[in-house]
Image (cartoon, rainbow, N blue to C red):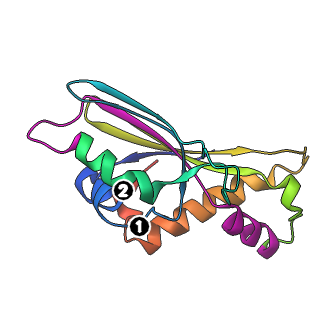
Amino acid sequence: MLGLTVTRLRDFTQHLFIKDSFDSFFLSEARFATSFTAEFDGKALSENAPQPYISWGQLRPVAFQLIRGKELPKSFSLVLVYSTEKTAALLAAADRETDPEMLPSLFINLRYRQEQLMLTTGVSEKSFYPDFGLPKLWDREVLKILAELGLEDAVRS
């Protein structure tokens, strides 16, 4: 599991809330504390939805409206999920099983409080793999995503 502190908060949050940089992710859950608290369950309500969660891109404008203003939010937390298509492609590139029924969930957890933003990664597997390779693979992928966004120096361990 990767645990990073975001050192360039403004740059990172612009990618998160203003730009479409994370729009390919899906939202599992979110909580915002400003002058009030707002919580979101990201479960898709439609039975025909291609993913079990709504896209971050759908909720991003609402989230931005919640946190914008003269004062910083007191706190927020987001659990973003990598798409099943991208998860399958990542596993296939690493010669791992890509059975659609057995695909793991790959998470980025973001927690902001006391003017500090933490990013951690997580993996929820549906089957047991004794080699522990998937969390390391996901950590490398997250670092690659951050580098592609120009945010590799916006975080530290």
Q: Amino acid at mark 2?
A: Leu
Mark identifier at residue 16: 2
Q: Measuring 23% from the left and 54% from the top, which residue is drawn there?
A: 10
Q: Is residue 147 left or right of residue 32?
A: right
* Local crowd size for mark 1, using a 10 Å CA cut-off: few (<14), some (14–19), many (≥20): some
Q: Give residue 145's position: percent from left, percent from top.
A: 51, 67
Tally of marks: 2
Q: Give residue 18's position: percent from left, percent from top.
A: 28, 60
* Local crowd size for mark 2, using a 10 Å CA cut-off: few (<14), some (14–19), many (≥20): some
Asked if 28 appears above or below 85 in the picture, the reply is above
User: Which residues lie in the magenta part?
Assistant: 67-93
Q: Measuring 33% from the left and 62% from the top, which residue is drawn there?
A: 15
Q: Earlier in the sequence, mark 2 or mark 1?
A: 2
Q: Amino acid at mark 1?
A: Ser
CB atoms of marks 2 and 1 within 8 Å: yes
Secondary structure category for the residue under label 1: loop
Secondary structure category for the residue under label 2: helix
Estimate the spatial distance between the alpha carbons at disc 2 and disc 1, rounded to whole Å: 7 Å
Q: Toward the viewer: 26 or 71?
A: 26
Q: Give residue 104's position: percent from left, percent from top.
A: 77, 51
Q: Toward the viewer: 74 or 147?
A: 74
Mark identifier at residue 57: none
Q: Is residue 157 visible?
A: yes
Name the residue that disc number 1 marks.
21
Q: Is residue 79 left or right of residue 97?
A: left
Q: Measuring 62% from the left and 62% from the top, which residue is drawn there?
A: 140
Q: Measuring 54% from the left and 69% from the top, which residue is drawn there?
A: 144
